[in-house]
Image (tube, coloured by chain):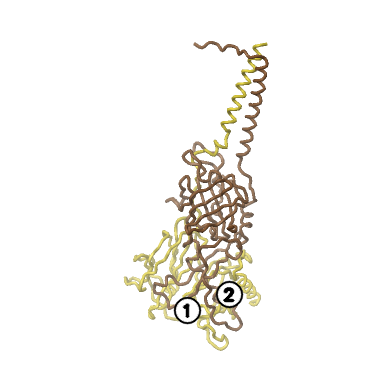
Chain colours: A brown, B yellow
Amino acid sequence: MQKRLPPVYLTRQAASGLLFLSLTTLIFGIFGILKTNQANEAPDVIDGSIAGFLAVAGPEAAGAEVLGTTQRPANASASTINPPAEATPEATTTEAETNQPDQPDQAGQPGQIGEAGEQVAPAPLLGAADMLSARPEDFQFTGGPQPVALHIANVDISASVVEMGLTEDRSLETPPASEIGWYKHGPTPGMEGSSVLAAHVDWGGQPGAFFELRNVVPGDRIEIDYDDGTTSAFEIVASRQYAKDIVPKTQLFDRSGAPRLVLVTCGGAFDNSMGHYEDNFVAFAKPVANI
Amino acid sequence: MRKAMFAAVLLLLLSALGQPVAAQSDDDEVAQVTIVHGIPGQTVDVYADDTPLIAGLVPSTTTRTFDLDEGDYALALFSAGADTNADEALVEADVEIEGGTNVTVVAHLDEDDEFTVSTFENDLDDVPAGDACLIARHTAAAPDVDILLDDEVAVEGLASGDSSDAAVLDPGTVAVNIAAAGDDAALLDSDVDLTLAEGVCTVAYAIGSLEDDNLGVLLQLVTGLDSAPEDDLDLGLSGILESDGGIPIGFMLLVAAGLIGGAFATRSLVTRS
């Protein structure tokens, strides 16, 4: 049976000192809690709307025209109409390249311009060469190097990048906890359109590859290494946090328009009953010169 | 009226010369047009309403898709370098272009080996995420054909000038061949291996002449039909972020210490007095 707590015998000075110390500690603790709460609120829109971001990324991104481009005869190996051997039309550049002076080297190199053929009088509006279309291999979705690593030095993100596709019910596959997934049906980073890179914010009680993503600010530099040994640089232009049911997926996964990156992870409040976060945190980036 | 319309066409085509363009005019007044030259052995100059459009278009070519103002165009194909005043056109056709549509204009041989022009509207639904799409069009001098995919009949009885419906398939490689309708024998010497990309509609045109033994396949890829993944993007399962961002333990302890210490001190002061 416990005795009643004896009264505490402290000198008056000691008691006053302790009281003072306790009050200080209390105030400090409360202040710390308030400060931390503030830091963890949803990040403000840093750079305006997505349209604003697209304007930064390149004017053609905003009203990106349907590509619908095509290519010349399939597979020379198959029997095709007798193509005059000397005049097999080769690719021209795709529109997306023209307005991106800082574009990193693209994997799908445009082919040579084919022969224009004879001129007729008056001169035609366009020679045949200008009307010819790209070869399949010039399209990002039929080849090109794949990303293998991503680094954002300012927030200590550095992880391997792996291919990420769709599950059987057409939802996004998720990458392993410590790796970043690159959506393989979209463009490789740096090619035309939105290249989506997704990683966990946490998993199995541990931070995921994109745990620090919420701390990026515009101007933060991203470097992506590819499987052909090259590296491209990008720069964060904006970030947003969306409730999962309103995240603009169609825009985030848009394969047309200026080359850009979309980095996605989870954020916001954690719904214990469902076992997941309520929001998606998205950071947008544009290519910059790799110097 | 024609001149004004034509000036508009000129402007659009010039602006299509490598210039990125947002829509020059309302979407409703402009169509997206692709030209396919499927007439074997004839390099041609293409004229629209007596104005030269393309010089030296070689056979087996699919052009880039470009914007064209809606309207009626008198299309004419001449032998490359021909004098349009002196020589006859190889083929002429009035082509109606409707605003807001996506069409392919194909110059090809018809069933009777005559030059002709067919216009196909590409009225395509979005391709579900993870799938690819394939359309077959018979634009050759041949009777009705079946289209074979990996040696199985996928489209039956396609007549010259006709298009199949869009078929949704798994992305990947598929071997395409053509057979006379109801017949087993493939007409192409070897299968054409098509790579069907996810989210893209591949249009395969059968071109050439059966009689001249130069049948082949031309492709047009229609992009912009892809779909985003379904459902939520779930990329976090442990809730660390919130506890890390929630009320931090350290500060909580300070508050507790402060309260306890304060209690002791107060008690001491109070009991003493």
- The label on residue B72 is 2
Q: Amino acid at mark 1?
A: Glu
Q: Nearer the viewer, residue A215 or B134?
A: A215
Q: Nearer the viewer, residue A112 or A246?
A: A112
User: What residue do we see at 52% from left, 48% from top?
Assistant: A158
Residue that sits furthest to the left in the current view: B184
Q: Which residue carries the number 1 mark? A: A86
Q: Does the residue at mark 2 contact the one at mark 1 (Cβ under 8 Å)?
A: no
Q: Quadrant of the C terminus of chain B?
A: top right
Mark 2 vs mark 1: tell me if same chain: no
Residue B49 against residue A60 in the figure, above or below = below
Cα gap from disc 2 to disc 1, whole angstroms:
35 Å
Question: Disc 2 sits on a residue from what chain?
Answer: B
User: What residue do we see at 51% from left, 60% from top?
Assistant: B225
Could you tell me residue B118's position as x and y percent?
A: 49, 74
| Corner quadrant of residue B40 | bottom left
Label 1 secondary element? helix
Could you tell me residue B249's position as x and y percent?
A: 56, 31
Q: Amino acid at mark 2?
A: Asp
Near mark 1 (Cα within 10 A), the count class, few <14, some 14-19 or many ≥20, is few
Label 2 secondary element? strand
Could you tell me residue A231's position as x and y percent?
A: 53, 57
